[in-house]
Image (spheres, rainbow, N blue to C red):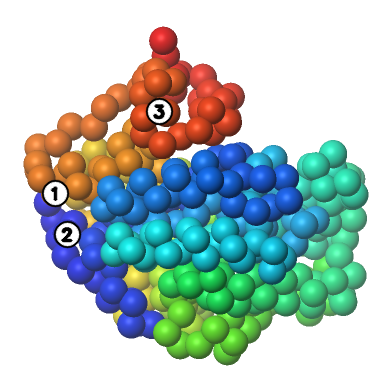
Amino acid sequence: MTNVFEKMKFPCGKIMPNRLALAPLTNTQSNVDGSLSDEEIKWLAMRAEGGFGITMTAAAHVNSAGQGFPGQFGVFNDDHLAGLKKLAKIIKAQGSLAVVQLHHAGLRSPRELIGEMPVAPSPSEKFSARGLSHGEVKSLIEDFITGAERAKAAGFDGVELHAAHNYIICQFLSSEFNQRTDEYGGSLQNRSRVLFDIITGIRERCGEEFLLGVRLTPERHGIELEEAIATAKVLFEKKEIDFLDISAWNVYKEPVDEALQGRSLLSYFTELDRGAIRLSAAGKVYTPEDINYCLEAGLDFVLMGRAAMLHHNYPALLKSDSGFVPNRIPVSRDYLLAEGLSERFIDYVGGQWPDFIGS
């Protein structure tokens, strides 16, 4: 296996014990008030115990009005600190880096869930969302920075900013969803200002030793690949982050843009000069061969989602047997319960991927 179990140092100084990270997976199993449930803590604790070098939480909303799905935990209230501290301590005790993914769903916040009209960079009739005022954009930036401070206070090693999947930072980056005419709209430089202001604020207030990553959508949701590449270049040039996480959906795929096909989507990012900043990706990384492909293609580490659901100790199994063959779906509910998924999580999985669960 290509350097899978070699340690890796981030620019902030944090050490990742291997190149396998738990992807941030929506699981709908925390409490209505945004506090962490014992079920969610168990799910994450088992992945840390199983050997993942980074144990990353599901998306945690930084504002109650930014909730994206039921059972989502938050980092917008000091009342959440008790659960956050418990989780961080458990993860770090296993030698895994503890990372919270910071999130605001924007126009994807269900009105019936948040009890008010969702917000977006610009008004959206399609999503029944209102546009943020200039002052509210400033408050949004502050919400992300405060969320990072709260994660640090709870003992987490760092955070990842969710700037993908058409959530609010992605919406600002998108020329389709961002029609603003102030300094947060128009040119790509302006549309990316929210992202970079959040990054600068977190770095200033959480310090140089705090792990800071960004998850980026490379295409779709109004994001053009060439603009995603340009954003990645600036992220690397500014040297304020520790890692960039490309949400590729499929690490083997070519770009959607026919003019850019003939090579892999990931190659457009691995070829960039990133200095000491680390590059990762997620998307159908399932077998040891998939892991090797990613690392040999130039990624520094990989994020694993469904494979980690099937094997809480995937890294440990692979380390003890280079010929390890992961289980395939469908699997039974009892199997998933034994792997640390709660009934609520399993119900969510069954709704998203009906072929995942069998008898």
Instruction: State which quarter of the image contains the C terminus.
Output: top left
Question: In the structure shown, which secondary structural element does the residue marked by tag 2 occupy?
Answer: loop
Cα separation, mark 2 vs mark 3, equals 26 Å
Task: Give whichever of 302, 42 is nearer the camera.
Answer: 42
Closest to the camera, between mark 2 and mark 3, is 3
Q: As shown in the figure, which amino acid type bears the numbered disc 1?
A: Lys
Residue, disc 3: 336
Q: Where is residue 86 in the image (x, y as percent from the top left)?
A: 49, 61
Residue 182 location, quadrant: bottom right
Label 2: few (<14), some or many (≥20) within 10 Å?
A: some
Residue under label 2, please give it.
5
At horizontal 41% and vertical 37% (from top left) the residue drawn is 340
Q: Marks 1 and 2: in contact by CB < 8 Å?
A: yes
Foreground pick, 125 / 34:
34
- Considering every residue shown, the one lying at the far top of the view is 359
Image coordinates of residue 54 in percent, x first then y, are 36, 60
> Which of the two residues, 15 or 154, is positioned nearer the viewer here?
154
Amino acid of disc 3:
Leu
User: Under tag 1, what secondary structure?
Assistant: helix
Height in image: 84 above or below 282? below
Q: Which of 218 and 81 is in front in this view?
A: 81
The dot on residue 319 is 1
